[in-house]
Each structure stands twice: as structure tokens, then as C-alpha cells.
Image (cartoon, grey):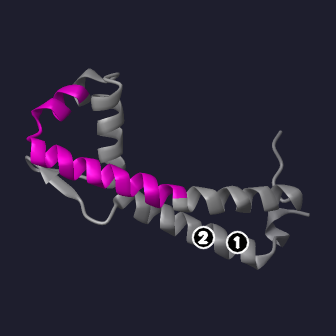
């Protein structure tokens, strides 16, 4: 069986999950700092790579330059991304598992 023959529910669920993932990445509201607009995904990246692990010097410097109240807004945005993202990833995992069980996905 090929993916083109797949159950329409799987297709609809995959589309829905993609739409929800895009919403999670955007977040409920963007944070604008010095003319730069940060989505929830960008806030996550800045905090994880600039504040938590300090693996990216540029991001660490940008994080340190933010006033405390903006850091708090960015943390809230990151939390939204994690929560909303997990609410998409779990159903997506189930969808992929079902597609694998039906033989709709093949890896070479």
C-alpha cells in the first residue's frame, strides 16, 4: 500500500498537525525587542542556546542585553511553545506509528 492510497483520516490529521505546529511555532503573541520580532520558536532558540547552554555567543549576548521584563516575556513565549509543541508532537507520533503499522511509510 502506498501513501497515496492512505486513509483520508490520516491525511486530514497530518494536515491538522502541521497547521497546529505552525501555530505553536508562532506562539500566541510575538515579542518585539529593538525592532526584532521574536516568535515563540525564536524565543525558545534564544533561551536554550543563549541562556541555558550558552553554546551560541551571539545569542548569549542578545539574551544578556534584554531587560528583565523582556526576558520574562520571552520565557513565557518559550513555555507556550513547549506546551503547544508537545500537544502536537504526541498526536504526530501516534499518526506516524499508525502509518508505519499500515505500511504507508518506508525508509531505505
Q: Is 59 above or below relative to 108? A: above
Given the current orientation, which residue lies at the most extreme right position? 1
Front residue of 43/103: it is 43
Q: x%, y% of residue 34?
A: 8, 46
Residue 89, position as x, y percentages in the image: 58, 56
Q: Is residue 45 left or right of residue 20?
A: left
Q: Which residues are magenta?
A: 60-86
From this view, report whether residue 108 is shown above or below residue 2: above
Is residue 12 visible in the rendered image? The answer is: yes
Specify the label residue 11 is tagged with.
Answer: 1
Q: Quadrant of residue 48?
A: top left
- Res 39 visible: no
Residue drawn at point x = 73 percent, y = 57 percent: 96
Image side of residue 35 versus residue 103, left or right: left
For numbered disc 2, what is the local secondary structure? helix
Q: Position of residue 82 (x, y in %)?
A: 43, 52
Q: Would you say the residues marked 1 and 2 are in contact, meaning their CB atoms lie under 8 Å apart? A: yes
Identified at 49% across, 61% down, the residue is 21
Q: Which residue appears at 37% of the width and 50% of the height? A: 41
Depicted 57 relative to depicted 52: above or below: above
Q: Is residue 58 above or below residue 106?
A: above
Q: In the picture, which quadrant includes the N terminus?
A: bottom right
Tell me the residue that label 2 is attached to: 15
Q: Is residue 70 left or right of residue 95?
A: left
The magenta stretch spans residue 70: yes
Amino acid at each position: 500500500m502506498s501513501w497515496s492510497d492512505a486513509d483520508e483520516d490520516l491525511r486530514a490529521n497530518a494536515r491538522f498537525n502541521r497547521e497546529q505546529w505552525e501555530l505553536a511555532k508562532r506562539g500566541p503573541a510575538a515579542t518585539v525587542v529593538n525592532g526584532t520580532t521574536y516568535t515563540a520558536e525564536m524565543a525558545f532558540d534564544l533561551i536554550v542556546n543563549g541562556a541555558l547552554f550558552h553554546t551560541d555567543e551571539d545569542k548569549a549576548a542578545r539574551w544578556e542585553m534584554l531587560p528583565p521584563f523582556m526576558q520574562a516575556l520571552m520565557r513565557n513565549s518559550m513555555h507556550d511553545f513547549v506546551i503547544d509543541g508537545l500537544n502536537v508532537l504526541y498526536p504526530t507520533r501516534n499518526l506516524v506509528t499508525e502509518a508505519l503499522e499500515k505500511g504507508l511509510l518506508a525508509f531505505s
